[in-house]
């Protein structure tokens, strides 16, 4: 297993070693000692979510208030997604920046997002299945969204599916109506880098 930090502090890509034979394959997709060494703290699992999405579906940009926010360890056991991490932490050196990682049923990579980061993804084929390991239970009153098509953040979303066919973005009513990045910042909805780091230091 290889764990690589992205340019955004608190975001990691986990690439497992795939062991295959005529029966199929086996992979260790999470190992606590390796994760703890990379992140600097253990992962306290509180909830596991699973979503299934049609091609073109965009979910996010979602985040939770700090503390305690909600760290996520995300895998795509079936299909493929372009997973997006957005640094929405006011005061962060990479504030407003985003990075993408392809998660699919070929390489079996995972991505970890620490507390305070924004998360979104786009499904690249029908039936794409995403499993999220979460450090805190879902708490609606503390959950927020930023419109994923917001030009200020400027995520470059895929326009073709895994097979190269054109696809249009499919958003929930919630995400369509979500505020822009600048609106969320102006109303004080975004977490700060300092409070996110302070909370993580307690783990």
Image (tube, rainbow, N blue to C red):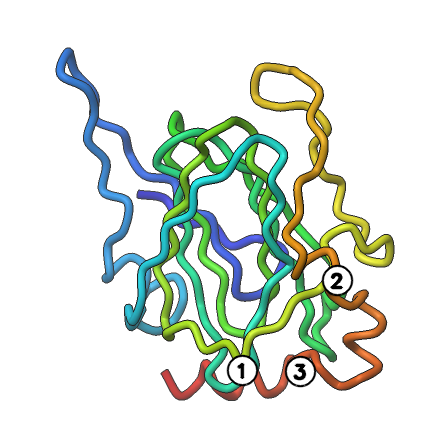
* Residue 39 on image: x %, y %: 40, 66
Q: From the image, tell me which residue sits under label 2.
A: 177
Residue that appears at 75% across and 47% down: 155
Secondary structure of residue under mark 3 = loop
Secondary structure of residue under mark 1 = helix
User: Of circles 2 and 3, which is in front?
Assistant: 2
- The single residue placed furthest to the left in the displayed view is 23
- In the image shown, does 11 or 158 lie closer to the viewer? 158
Q: Label 2 neighbourhood size at 10 Å, few (<14), some (14-19), many (20+)?
A: few
Residue that appears at 42% across and 47% down: 51
Q: Label 3 neighbourhood size at 10 Å, few (<14), some (14-19), many (20+)?
A: many
Q: Quadrant of residue 41?
A: bottom left
Q: From the image, tell me which residue sits under label 3.
A: 192
Residue that appears at 78% across and 68% down: 179
Query: Mark 2 and mark 3: span between their CA atoms?
Result: 23 Å
Q: Label 1 neighbourhood size at 10 Å, few (<14), some (14-19), many (20+)?
A: few
Tell me: residue 199, above or below residue 44.
Answer: below
Query: Mark 1 and mark 2: span between their CA atoms?
Result: 17 Å
- The single residue placed furthest to the top in the displayed view is 22
Which disc, if any, is residue 197? none
* Residue 103 on image: x %, y %: 47, 37
- In the image shown, does 28 or 78 lie closer to the viewer? 78
Q: From the image, tell me which residue sits under label 1.
A: 141
* Residue 162 on image: x %, y %: 57, 21
- In the image shown, does 103 or 131 lie closer to the viewer? 131
Of callouts 1 and 2, which one flags the residue occurring earlier in the amino acid sequence?
Answer: 1
Query: Mark 1 and mark 3: span between their CA atoms?
Result: 18 Å
């Amino acid at each position: 297993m290889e764990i690589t930090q992205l340019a955004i502090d608190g975001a990691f890509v986990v690439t497992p070693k795939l062991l295959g034979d005529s029966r199929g394959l086996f992979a260790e997709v999470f190992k606590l000692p390796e994760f703890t060494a990379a992140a600097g703290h253990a992962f306290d699992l509180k909830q596991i979510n699973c979503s299934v999405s049609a091609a073109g579906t965009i979910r996010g940009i979602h985040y939770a208030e700090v503390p305690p926010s909600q760290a996520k360890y995300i895998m795509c056991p079936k299909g493929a997604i372009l997973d997006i991490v957005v640094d929405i932490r006011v005061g962060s050196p990479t504030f407003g920046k985003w990075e993408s990682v392809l998660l699919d049923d070929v390489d079996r990579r995972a991505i970890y997002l620490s507390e305070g980061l924004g998360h979104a993804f786009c499904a690249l084929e029908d039936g794409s299945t995403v499993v999220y390991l979460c450090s805190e239970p879902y708490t609606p009153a503390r959950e927020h969204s930023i419109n994923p098509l917001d030009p200020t953040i400027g995520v470059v979303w895929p326009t073709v599916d895994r097979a190269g066919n054109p696809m249009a973005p499919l958003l929930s009513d919630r995400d369509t109506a979500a505020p822009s990045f600048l609106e969320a910042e102006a109303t004080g909805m975004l977490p700060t880098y300092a409070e996110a780091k302070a909370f993580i230091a307690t783990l």
